[in-house]
Image (cartoon, helix red, strand yellow):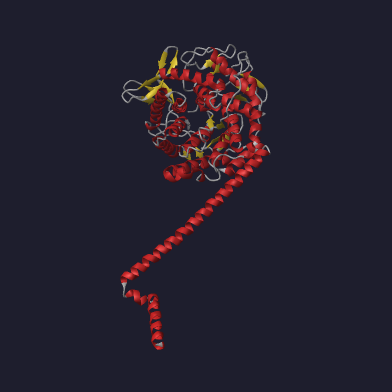
């Protein structure tokens, strides 16, 4: 019995060990397959648990970092340093990081955004190498020129573009120049408008983005030098002032009149300056201009481009949404947005809506292609001419459309889309695919180029940016990319970007306009960026594309006191006012 039990136990042990013998499975392929499947499933379970644990640890780590960051911000806020310490609402260390999930969903937009960023690096590096500290670069001759009195216009115009694109080293070098070398005490007769939109606007935007007080201090310095321009009997400002000695006056070619755009486009900048410094004098000067104009505001909301600064009344002259008129209408809308649409800024919106009725009365369509365009007007006569500068209007209409009731909103948005199509064709209908300065319209012939130069203007891509942001239609991104590629093909040189003397022949000029870096490249970059980058719910762009932080206003409407005023002509007015464009 004992031997019998011993033999049986040995046999059972032998049978159990056979499952560990590979030869057993080689003779039984079905069992081998089953064992393999069990092994694979077990491996997947273990791997999945490992991945979940790893992902969980990463998420916990990121949450801890966010908690620490928020704790730091809270502590800084308690110490009164929140404005200086809080950074822009996206990680500006890497242009790729700020795109988030949107970039992953649209790799084409990501790639295009990086191409635009590369273009900015090329433009900025060329300026830094050949024209550092000067107003603008002449790429063909590789030297700098002082078109605005030697205020470093390109450098200041580029600050916020550098910041938004995450070009931190370049931004820091530019900031150091502002802190240590920027001097406004110059015996130079400056355009109040150009100095405001480029210099005051550029510095305020850089302050809002970075929180660095050096920008605010410099903005206040230059604004104080401009303020005497508003000391007129009516409060309508003179458009020129000497930065060192004062002596405000108007250019001789206006017959003593002030220009509508030059006198009605400083509100954003000077209101922002009062909000950030606590000194109301800047806001009072510029808001009084609007009140003076509103006293005799016409039923169609259309003002001629010349205003008498003694009486505060308009002179017989052209009505236009192009040069010398444009940005007055733009700022009526944008001050309403800047004030967060409160009752304090309601009159701006009301004036703007009145003017948009007038704009609608100037719209005609070509034959045979039915391109919509905005006429100019003199008295009761319309001229079938439209500046490329007026191509800011589609973006303005789209931006303002949301303030209307549903039917009106759709009407103005549709008009914006029609006008944008026309402006895009300003580019597409030339051999270089770059737009001329203005266009004429003739029955049966659609449109033809008038003044044929191109100086790297931003207005069309500005409108494409707004329309893409507000409609989500990627067609506008495609149009913008086509325009960018035309700039790359025709305007890029080894030492920067230049305009064209003639869009038909492609002959190049010798100037890299500061607004190419401030506006054209910035709007193109944002056209391919997520909507959270400079959100239109939080920022409003001045007419030089400098984003200003929106702050709600609950102040009383400024009372008119003759001697206060506003000013600013749109960038579209530059060609007429600045003699440097004459060589085109």
Q: Is 488 on the left-hand or right-hand side of 137? A: left
Residue 277 visible? The answer is yes
Residue 564 lies, in percent from the top left, at 62, 18
Q: Nearer the viewer, residue 275 or 249?
A: 275
Q: At 54% across and 29% down in the image, what residue appears?
A: 542
Residue 181 visible? The answer is no
Residue 471 lies, in percent from the top left, at 42, 33
Q: Which of the 4 image quarters holds residue 198?
A: top right
State whether residue 563 is above or below residue 199.
above
Q: Nearer the viewer, residue 59 or 270?
A: 59
Residue 344 lies, in percent from the top left, at 57, 21
Residue 116 lies, in percent from the top left, at 48, 40
Give the total of numbered labels: 0
Q: Which of the 4 image quarters holds residue 129?
A: top right
State whether residue 18 is above or below residue 131.
below
Q: At 55% across and 23% down in the image, what residue appears?
A: 568
Q: Image quadrant for the N terminus?
A: bottom left
Q: Is 28 on the left-hand or right-hand side of 344? A: left
């Amino acid at each position: 019995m004992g031997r019998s039990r011993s033999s049986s136990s040995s046999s059972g042990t032998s049978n159990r060990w056979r499952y560990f013998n590979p030869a057993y499975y080689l003779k039984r392929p079905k069992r081998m397959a089953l064992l393999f499947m069990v092994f694979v499933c077990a491996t997947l379970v273990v791997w999945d648990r490992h991945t979940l644990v790893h992902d969980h640890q990463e998420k916990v780590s990121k949450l801890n970092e966010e908690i620490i960051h928020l704790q730091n911000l809270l502590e800084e806020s308690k110490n009164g340093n929140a404005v200086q310490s809080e950074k822009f609402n996206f990680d500006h260390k890497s242009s790729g990081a700020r795109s988030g999930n949107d970039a992953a969903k649209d790799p084409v937009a990501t790639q295009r955004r990086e191409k635009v960023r590369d273009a900015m690096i090329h433009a900025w590096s060329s300026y830094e190498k050949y024209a550092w500290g000067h107003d603008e670069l002449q790429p063909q001759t590789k030297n700098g020129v002082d078109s605005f009195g030697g205020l470093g216009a390109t450098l200041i115009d580029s600050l916020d573009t550098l910041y938004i694109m995450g070009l931190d080293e370049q931004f820091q070098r530019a900031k150091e120049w502002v802190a240590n070398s920027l001097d406004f005490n110059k015996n130079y007769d400056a355009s109040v408008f150009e100095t405001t939109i480029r210099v005051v606007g550029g510095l305020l935007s850089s302050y809002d983005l970075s929180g660095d007080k050096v920008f605010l201090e410099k903005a206040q310095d230059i604004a104080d030098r401009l303020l005497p321009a508003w000391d007129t009997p009516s409060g309508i400002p003179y458009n020129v002032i000497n930065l060192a000695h004062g002596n405000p006056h108007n250019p001789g070619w206006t017959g003593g009149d002030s220009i509508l755009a030059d006198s009605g486009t400083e509100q954003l900048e000077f209101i922002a300056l009062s909000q950030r410094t606590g000194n109301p004098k800047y806001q009072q000067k510029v808001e009084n201009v609007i009140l003076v104009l509103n006293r005799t505001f016409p039923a169609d909301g259309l003002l001629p481009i010349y205003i008498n600064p003694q009486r505060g009344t308009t002179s017989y002259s052209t009505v236009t949404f192009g040069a010398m008129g444009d940005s007055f209408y733009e700022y009526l809308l944008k001050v309403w947005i800047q004030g967060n649409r409160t009752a304090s800024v309601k009159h701006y919106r009301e004036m703007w809506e009145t003017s948009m009725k007038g704009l609608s009365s100037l719209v005609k369509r070509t034959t045979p292609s039915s391109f919509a365009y905005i006429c100019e007007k003199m008295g009761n006569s319309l001229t079938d001419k439209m500046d490329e500068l007026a191509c800011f209007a589609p973006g303005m209409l789209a931006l303002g459309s949301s303030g209307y009731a549903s039917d009106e909103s759709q009407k103005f948005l549709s008009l914006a889309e029609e006008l944008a199509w026309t402006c895009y064709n300003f580019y597409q209908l030339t051999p270089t695919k770059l737009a001329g300065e203005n266009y004429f319209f003739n029955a049966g012939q659609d449109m033809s180029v008038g003044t044929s130069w191109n100086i790297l203007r931003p207005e069309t891509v500005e409108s494409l940016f707004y329309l893409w942001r507000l409609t989500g239609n990627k067609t506008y991104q495609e149009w913008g990319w086509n325009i960018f590629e035309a700039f790359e093909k025709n305007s890029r040189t080894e030492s920067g970007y230049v305009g064209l003397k003639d869009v038909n022949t492609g002959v190049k000029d010798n100037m890299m306009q500061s607004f190419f870096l401030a506006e054209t490249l910035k709007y193109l970059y944002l056209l391919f960026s997520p909507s959270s980058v400079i959100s239109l719910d939080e920022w409003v762009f001045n007419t030089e594309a400098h984003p200003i932080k929106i702050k709600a206003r609950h102040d009383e409407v400024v009372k008119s006191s003759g001697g206060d005023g506003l000013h600013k002509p749109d960038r579209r007015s530059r060609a007429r006012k600045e003699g440097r464009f004459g060589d085109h």
